[in-house]
Image (cartoon, rainbow, N blue to C red):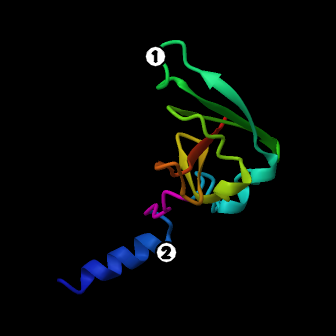
Amino acid sequence: MIGLIPNIFAAATALNLLDFRRPHQASSGQAIDIGQCPAVSDIHSKPYTDPDLPPPYGEGYEYSAHTRGRTWKGQTAGTDDDYLAPRYALKAETITQTEGRLRCDYGGKTVVEEGVTATPYLRLNSQ
């Protein structure tokens, strides 16, 4: 009887009755890859202040990009560093899909100036 279990599993998989898509694959069955994230050169930034948070916690940057038919947005808070500056060497590191929207996470080079450490992290969400 134990030998029957793998056979049922194999048959269900062959008939596509079991959905084994990984979280990094689109719901259409198409795999998503890091190449779908906006290139750093396509991302634009502008200073942003959250009116609901006291300085310096609400101060940061708002980021946006319009590429490949998608609009992307993200923001940072609690920093006066624009992570698009060349010294951070920002690059896309991961892409995930949640509720039909893509999320691209960017990281880069940690910079230490005057004893203050800045480790870049930016998440852009497709709209």
Question: Residue 46, percent across and down?
Answer: 73, 30
Give yes or no for residue 111 being in the magenta stretch. no
Is residue 11 among what the camera can see? yes
Task: Indicate the quadrant where residue 82 lies.
Answer: top right
Q: Secondary structure at mark 1?
A: loop
Residue indicated by mark 1: 54
Q: Point out the frontmost of discs 2 and 1.
A: 1
Is residue 101 among what the camera can see? no
Question: Residue 8, percent across and down?
Answer: 33, 75
Q: Amino acid at mark 1?
A: Pro
Residue with the most extreme top position = 51
Q: Amino acid at mark 2?
A: Ala
Q: From which residue to which does the magenta span run?
A: 18-24
Q: Neighbour class for label 1 at 10 Å: few (<14), some, many (≥20)?
A: few
Q: Secondary structure at mark 2?
A: helix
Give the residue drawn at x 30%, y 81%. 6
The label on residue 73 is none
CA gap between label 2 and label 1 equals 57 Å
The image quadrant where one finds the N terminus is bottom left
Task: Indicate the quadrant where residue 95 lies.
Answer: bottom right
Name the N-terminal-most of marks 2 and 1: 2
Question: Residue 110, percent across and down?
Answer: 54, 57
Give the residue drawn at x 42%, y 76%. 11
Q: Main secondary structure of the magenta part?
A: loop
Question: Residue 99, percent across and down?
Answer: 53, 40
Residue with the most extreme front position = 114
Where is 31 relative to 14, above or below? above
In front: 109, or 111? 111
Residue indicated by mark 2: 14
The answer to whether the residues at label 2 and label 1 have Cβ atoms under 8 Å apart is: no
